[in-house]
Image (spheres, rainbow, N blue to C red):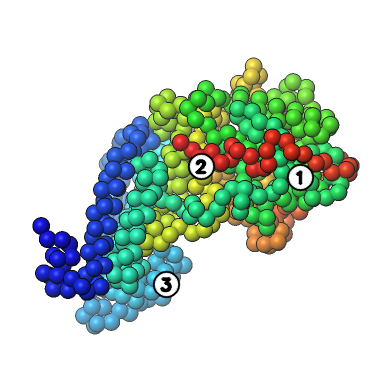
Amino acid sequence: MPSIEEALGRLGFGSNAPTAKKLAGNIERIEALGQRLVAAFGDRALHDPGVEGPSPELYMTAAGAWMKTLAEQPARIIEHQVNFWGETLKHYARAQMALARGKLALPEEEAPRDKRFKHPLWHSHPYFNFVMKQYQINAKAMKDAAADLQMPDEVARRRVNWLTNQVIDMMAPTNFLATNPDALEKAVETEGESLVRGLENLVRDVERHGGEMIVSLADHDAFAVGENIGTTAGTVVHRTRLFELIQYAPTTDQVHALPVVIFPPWINKFYILDLKPQNSLIRWIVDQGHTLFVVSWKNPDASFADTGLEDYVGAYLEAMDKVRELTGQAKLNAVGYCIAGTTLSLTLALLKQRGDDRVNSATFFTTLTDFSDQGEFTTFLQDDFVNGIAEEVERHGLLMAPLMSRTMSFLRANDLVWGPAIRSYMMGESPPAFDLLFWNGDSTNLPGRMTMQYLRGLCQRNDFANGGFELLGHRLHISDVTVPLCSVACEGDHIAPWKDCWQGVAQMGSADKSFILSESGHVAGIVNPPSKRKYGHYTGGADFTHGFQAWRDSSSFAEGSWWPVWGAWLAERAGEMVPARDPGPGLEPAPGRYVHERAI
């Protein structure tokens, strides 16, 4: 059998020609990569059908709604069809006329351009312009048709709309090589090298994620926790099976008497608050003269299957005990971020019922405590999907990190799935060296028992805001949270919408409440240092009785970070100044060892 180079030579490519050699080499690379890809996909674990896609019930609900609309309002269905085919035929006619004239006359864009179609050829080349316009016609027709279905309830409507948008995003012409001018140009410029590199990137991702096709958002080799991110000086002063407690070294001669302890979410790792010195909230708090402790959670394996919310609340209490012991203070100020804020509120309710006043004030970052409106998570919080997660948890003892990452990514599919996949797999680009996205990819497993308690009891039944959440022999209610509190929410947050964060705070029993609304999203709105002056914030009064819109209407906007506003609030509740506390050698230097454990 002739070699690839010999075969190319017989087809007219000189065997010594650089192009032929390069093509031959690329073909051999593709063959090897193809074999690796097949082997990698073979390692993929089988998941419960409930987490792989919408249930048959959702399709039946949509089909039933369509049949009901057809039977009761056939004119509406016909109108949709006529409008769609009318727009399609007009579009085809315009394209034919442009081809006949040999010139494409483009109308002025009426709406802001979709960033996916920023390449000039989408607006100047007849072929690409035709494809783009037809896609937009199709997308509008699908959205209009879904919007007019007579759905049985709002939950079904939200789910059908979500599925419709997922299909629209998936079928964008930018997601296919033949209709992506950026990828085609890159392939021509590199003589196909970009496509081979893209295949290499794809194989790498599938192998890295155990057969799951999860695109890498950042360069995994660009950062090392404790070396170029997560570098604020400190000491691990306490370690348990579930967490490490880090005390940070002071940077001021004096500190406030009352220490601060931060409970970060265990869905990701704590160094989101300590990425780089210039955007580290941890470093900033220390610089404001606080003795700061931060919990670093264990990345659980299957042996943590029975670890529940009661264990995390117990960890909160143990960490607080250790902080008070090390500082000699009876009280402290506590901070909880996202799910850790939700659990902090449970802990505060428990302490209230026990008559324990160890927490002087509480701060919640993007924290939900009232789940009555499930927002963008509606699709993922119905029984079909949650039952699928329950089966996964039963099988593995954990909610595995890749499944969690994949689910969260599809809340912002164009930004976190399709866009990165195009750049990596079609353009052959290396993932960027972006610290925030590196952190986003350093995900964690979740213990099985805790996962189901959270999904069933807090999210689905909304027990904490309704009849009470059963934990450690107590029935905990949101109104049991009575300590002075400050809640920071983010205007563009799709994980913890600010209106729902506000709604929970409004139901808490505290007489001293503050609410800050930051611009931007779940992470960027929190990691928003004063030096950047990138995102502003809103502050308002203490009236939590007339709804979130009344609060927003009465709030005032200020440029720049919310950190100084919260810093002033915290300082008022942190006591007098005392000599700075040196954590000493402890168990080992920060950031400790648990933060380095990768999800299995």
Left or right of 153 on screen, residue 357: right
Question: Horizontal placement of 452 versus 287: left or right?
Answer: left
Residue type indicated by callout 3: Glu
Which is closer to the viewer, label 2 or label 1? 1
Q: Which residue is mark 1?
A: 249
Mark closest to the chain's N terminus, 2 or 1: 1
Which comes sooner in the sequence, label 2 or label 3?
Answer: 3
Say the numbered circle drawn on residue 443: 2
Give the crowd class for mark 3: few <14, some 14-19, many >=20 residues within 10 Å: few
Can residue 479 be seen in this snapshot?
no
Residue drawn at x 23%, y 78% is 99
**Quadrant of the rendering where the N terminus is positioned:** bottom left
Q: Which residue is mark 3?
A: 109
Amino acid at circle 2: Ser
First-in-chain label (1 vs 3): 3
Residue at 76% of width from left, 33% of height from top? Answer: 323
Q: Give the image quarter of residue 389.
A: top left
**Mark 1 residue element:** loop
Residue 101 point in image, percent of width and height = 24, 83
